[in-house]
Image (cartoon, helix red, strand yellow):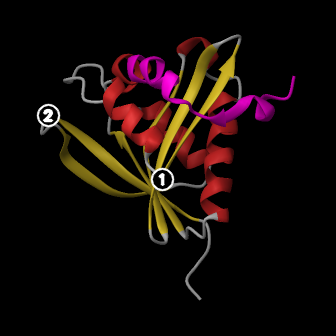
Amino acid sequence: MNIDSMICVAKVGDADQIAVMSRDLIEHGMSWNWRAEAVEKSIQDPNTNVAVLREEGRIRGFGIMRYLDDEAHLVLFAVAIANQRQGVGSALLRWLESAASIAGVQRIRVEARRENAAARCFYNEHGYHEVKLEPGMYRKKLDGIRLEKWLRTTS
């Protein structure tokens, strides 16, 4: 099966699964902010895309991208541990970048924990450049790295 064809826009009913994935895969070691209500708000926000890759009724990966004029912010992005290194993240990122490009976005920004070498390598491999180390970015406890990718330059 073509993995790209398994990606779709999230439904409100997906909020619980996405929230649990955020808690376990992204927010581990910190307080849980992306609960189902916050995810549901993003799903309903007209300036936000929430994409999921679903297989056999389970969400295997998701991305939440918010649009701000001519740039976008990849707010949350995760792939279930059992599905990592199988192309799920790359397919989701391609889908989100394509949607951003169609929307006229020039640049996408994303953050990762400084110690998350796997995430930093993943984004680097997909054309994102590290632009700034941000001490205490995550709840004033953990350092973060800001990354960005230019989809097109200003004319």
Q: Nearer the viewer, residue 97 or 7?
A: 7
- Residue 70 placed where, x, y %? 49, 72
Q: Secondary structure at mark 2?
A: loop
Q: Nearer the viewer, residue 134 or 8?
A: 8
Q: Examine the structure image and report whether residue 5 is included in the region drawn in magenta.
A: yes
Which residue type carries mark 1?
Answer: Pro
Q: Badge 1 local density, few (<14 within 10 Å), some, or many (20+)? A: few
Residue at 64% across / 38% down in the picture?
92
- Residue 78 placed where, x, y %? 50, 29
- Circle 2 sits on which residue? 141
Q: Residue furthest left?
A: 140
Quadrant holding the C terminus:
bottom right
Quadrant holding the N terminus:
top right
Instruction: Please tell me whether mark 2 or mark 1 is closer to you in this view.
Output: 1
Residue at 23% across / 41% down in the picture?
143
9 w.r.t. 85: above or below: below
Residue at 68% across / 45% down in the picture?
95
Residue 84: image quadrant is: top right
Residue at 80% across / 33% down in the picture?
5
- Residue 47 placed where, x, y %? 46, 56
Secondary structure that dominates the magenta span = helix
Highlighted range, magenta: 1-20
Q: Distance from label 2 to label 1 (Cα)? A: 32 Å
Residue 4: image quadrant is: top right
155 w.r.t. 26: above or below: below
Q: Examine the structure image and report whether residue 146 is included in the region drawn in magenta.
A: no
Mark 2 or 1 closer to N-term?
A: 1
- Circle 1 sits on which residue? 46
